Image (cartoon, helix red, strand yellow):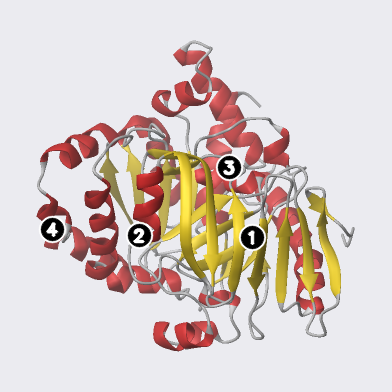
Amino acid sequence: MDLEQRIEKYAELLVVKGCALEQGQELYLNAPVQVVGFVRTLVKKAYEHGASYVTVNWHDGLVNRYTYDNAPLERFEHLPEWSAERANSMARNGAAVLTILSEDPLVMRGADQAKLVARTVAAHVDCKEYYDAIDFGKMRWCIAGAASEQWATRVFPETSPKESVARLWNAVLDASRVDEDPLAAWDKHQSSFAARKQWLNDQHFVALHYTASNGTDLVVGLLDRAHWEGGGQEGADGIYFFPNIPTEEVFTSPDRMHVDGIVYSALPLIHHGAPVEDFWIRFEGGRAIDYGAREGADILKGIIETDENSCRLGECALVPFKSPIRNTGILFYETLFDENASCHLAFGKGFPECYENGYEMSCLELLNAGVNDSATHVDFMIGTPDINIKGIHADGSTTNVFVNGNWAHDVL
């Protein structure tokens, strides 16, 4: 296949497997203006697969940056009513949501963090119907990437813009398993997660102990009624979809009150278009109590202090160092891809689907059970080539989960 054929197959993959779009369903498509050609292909594929209507929410990184640089803080403390109503109405109408990432990863470098934090909180307050529908499996959603010149020249600065875009497209497509039959490839990929999840769930670990030569020495508590997920996700309606394309991780929501020790980053964190590099975080009783970074300490502070619970973990995810994305040797500067090249943790919101009957519980009930709740969810990568992870059992005995960056047991 040539590149254009692969891109068309990719568009179909996002609609059919990512969003699991049904006949007569609406599609809400969030996309940057830089990839208008790809968006047209997505819209065409959506209608071919039965969409009743497609709404495209366009945005542009530089326009957003101008707004953050010039509008006063109070303008970010609430969303415009029309904007909130659009998102909330999509939830009421049962739309599927497809979000395309393609902006310059560093477009917000140096922007006012107070404004970025305010907008994050405002979005989750003003669009509560929308975010509740996503968090509790009432909407099917997918996040994926598309190559733009702005993103590609960050990833491949040594080549011409045209060549960089082509290289990034091929990297995105390879990571997303776009071959002659990507729909079948993703069915096979999904089945590969089953044995790994089963093994982890059968262990009934009460905690994971992470160590690495960079100084990481962290114990993350696990919940009795929590379980491991990975690959795709079954919504509250029983329909299977893939929230992230690509994905290589198995993950769970840890005990928000029992995280202790120190952890060091393995890859840069790009948050809202700004980098945090070479950072560390110390936890005590589940809270991040101290931290530092070579660059972006103010951004890290904004993440940790977004709200009351953003200082606690909502996710721990396991990804072998030999993952397909890590093997490319490419730093994508985009968490969707980079988190699938490394074990990672996440501040903020936990996952109802990772807790027994979680979809049937309220946010407060989940919080009281130990699943974190927050307006934010920010992944950060900690998986080094020598990271070791031991699972701790209730009797204090341990089982190796990772040895030198990779799975200790071949259960596939």
Residue at 11% across, 38% down: 70
Mark closest to the chain's N terminus, 3 or 2: 2
Q: Nearer the viewer, mark 4 or mark 3?
A: 3
The earlier-in-sequence mark between 1 and 4 is 4
Q: Secondary structure at mark 3?
A: helix
According to the picture, the residue beneath numbered tag 2 turns out to be 52
Dot 2: within a 10 Å radius of its alpha carbon, few (fewer than 14), some, or many (20 or more) residues? Answer: some
Q: Nearer the viewer, mark 1 or mark 2?
A: 1
Q: Nearer the viewer, mark 1 or mark 4?
A: 1
Callout 1 touching callout 3 (CB < 8 Å): no
Residue type, numbered disc 4: Pro
Q: Give left or right: position of 127 versus 260.
A: left
Contact between labelled residues 2 and 1, with CB atoms less than 8 Å apart: no
Q: Where is mark 1, residue-wise?
A: 317
Whole-number angstrom distance, CA of label 1 to CA of label 4: 35 Å
The one of 129 and 319 positioned closer to us in this rendering:
319
Q: Compute the Cα span from label 1 to label 2.
A: 36 Å
Neighbours of disc 1 within 10 Å: few (<14), some (14-19), many (20+): many
Cα–Cα gap, marks 1 and 3: 13 Å
Q: Which mark is residue 80?
A: 4
Residue 19: x, y in percent?
A: 50, 58
Position of residue 29 in the picture relative to residue 2 (left or right): left
| Residue that mark 3 sits on | 338
Amino acid of disc 3? Asp
Amino acid on which the number 2 mark rests in the picture: Ser
